[in-house]
């Protein structure tokens, strides 16, 4: 499964679209896109941001063809030359003051990768929560997966011990990979890069140390990592909803002024000490509150 992302002007994108049409590609639209085209070995999504996402076995050749069509140099930097089966991992909640940290992993093969592309699966940051929750069901029903949820109270205890978010993330990514390998062995894993590459490798246990692990900036462009980002986000949203129901208070996402306002209301209603059960206390937000 190969991927590449190329920035195109609307004129360049139209020229690429015409070429895809001449190949007999099928066209439709997914969220935040102007068009999506599919052939037997390629999916191309042109987003409103002006980025063209390519996925499939023909990505390298098609990237070169785009260079011919547009007259611009394109670099195919996101090639994955894995075998049929590999694991992708990603996280959700890292930048949110309220709620847990969730790390998820999804294992794909050629069939499930194609199915996920047909479903329009992509980086969860490009989808709204209602779409994410529906896609998460499809992913969990069709692929080996693992979801590691670190609730705020446990998160604060772990962070107090390690004082390093990247180490905590690495532990979660490693656990997700190990959990999947227990159910369905494979040789490769891919994660979004968030720190020193040795962190996840050092956190892996026996089965994990036997695989090849790649960590990549903007790893969500890969279909397995994108699928992992979706089930991680769906789990994060559900856990946030549970916290809101438990404490009868709205908990905004992120770490903005509205978050500070609601955190102050929470402290008035309960106590400062109770914050440890709903929030990540090492954020600067805590001092502002």
Image (tube, grey):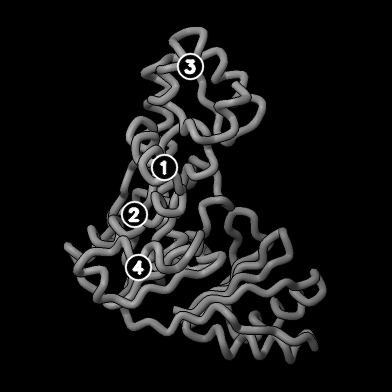
Distance (Cα) linking label 2 and label 3:
31 Å
| Most distant residue in the top direction | 269
Disc 2 element: helix
Instruction: Bin the neighbour count of mark 2 within 10 Å (Cα to Cα): few under 14, some 14-19, many 20 and up.
Output: some
Is the residue 95 above or below the residue 1 in the image? above
Pointers 2 and 3 in contact (CB under 8 A)? no
Q: Which residue is mark 2?
A: 171
What is the quadrant of the N terminus in the image? bottom left
Q: Which residue is mark 3?
A: 249
**In-front residue for pair 43/155:** 155
Number of numbered discs: 4
Instruction: Bin the neighbour count of mark 4 within 10 Å (Cα to Cα): few under 14, some 14-19, many 20 and up.
Output: some
Distance (Cα) linking label 3 and label 4:
40 Å
- Tell which circle, 3 or 1, labels the residue nearer the N-terminal end: 1
Query: Which of pointers 2 and 3 indicates the residue nearer the eye?
Result: 2
Disc 1 element: strand
- Tell which circle, 4 or 2, labels the residue nearer the N-terminal end: 2
Residue at (42, 26) in percent of width and height: 278
Instruction: Bin the neighbour count of mark 1 within 10 Å (Cα to Cα): few under 14, some 14-19, many 20 and up.
Output: many
Is the residue 179 above or below the residue 65 in the image? above
Q: In which quarter of the view is residue 52 placed?
A: bottom right
Q: Which numbered tag is attached to residue 201?
A: 4
Distance (Cα) linking label 3 and label 1:
20 Å
Q: How far from the left and from the top, in percent, is residue 263?
A: 54, 20
Q: Which residue is mark 1?
A: 101
Query: Which of pointers 3 and 1 indicates the residue nearer the eye?
Result: 1
Camera sees residue 175: yes
Residue at (35, 35) in percent of width and height: 157
Is the residue 68 above or below the residue 79 in the image? below
| Most distant residue in the left direction | 182
């Amino acid at each position: 499964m190969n991927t590449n992302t190329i920035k195109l002007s609307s004129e360049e994108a139209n020229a690429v679209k015409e070429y895809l049409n001449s190949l007999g590609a099928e066209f439709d639209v997914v969220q935040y896109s102007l068009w999506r085209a599919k052939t037997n070995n390629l999916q191309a999504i042109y987003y409103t941001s002006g980025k063209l996402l390519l996925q499939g076995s023909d990505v390298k050749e098609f990237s070169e063809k785009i260079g011919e069509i547009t007259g611009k140099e394109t670099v195919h930097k996101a090639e994955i030359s894995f075998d049929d089966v590999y694991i992708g991992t990603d996280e959700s909640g890292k930048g949110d003051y309220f709620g847990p940290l969730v790390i998820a992993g999804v294992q794909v093969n050629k069939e499930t990768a194609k199915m996920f592309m047909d479903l329009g699966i992509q980086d969860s940051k490009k989808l709204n929560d209602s779409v994410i929750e529906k896609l998460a069901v499809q992913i969990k029903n069709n692929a080996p997966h693992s979801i590691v949820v670190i609730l705020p109270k446990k998160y604060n205890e772990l962070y107090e011990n390690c004082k390093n978010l990247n180490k905590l993330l690495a532990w979660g990514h490693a656990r997700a990979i190990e959990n999947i390998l227990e159910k369905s062995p494979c040789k490769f894993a891919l994660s979004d890069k968030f720190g020193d590459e040795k962190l996840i490798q050092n956190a892996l246990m026996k089965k994990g140390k036997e695989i090849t692990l790649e960590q990549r900036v903007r790893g969500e462009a890969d279909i397995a990592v994108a699928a992992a980002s979706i089930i991680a986000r769906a789990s994060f949203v559900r856990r946030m909803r549970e916290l809101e129901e438990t404490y009868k208070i709205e908990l905004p996402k992120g770490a903005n002024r509205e978050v500070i306002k609601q955190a102050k209301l929470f402290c008035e209603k309960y106590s400062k000490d109770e914050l440890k059960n709903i929030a990540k206390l090492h954020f600067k937000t805590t001092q502002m509150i």
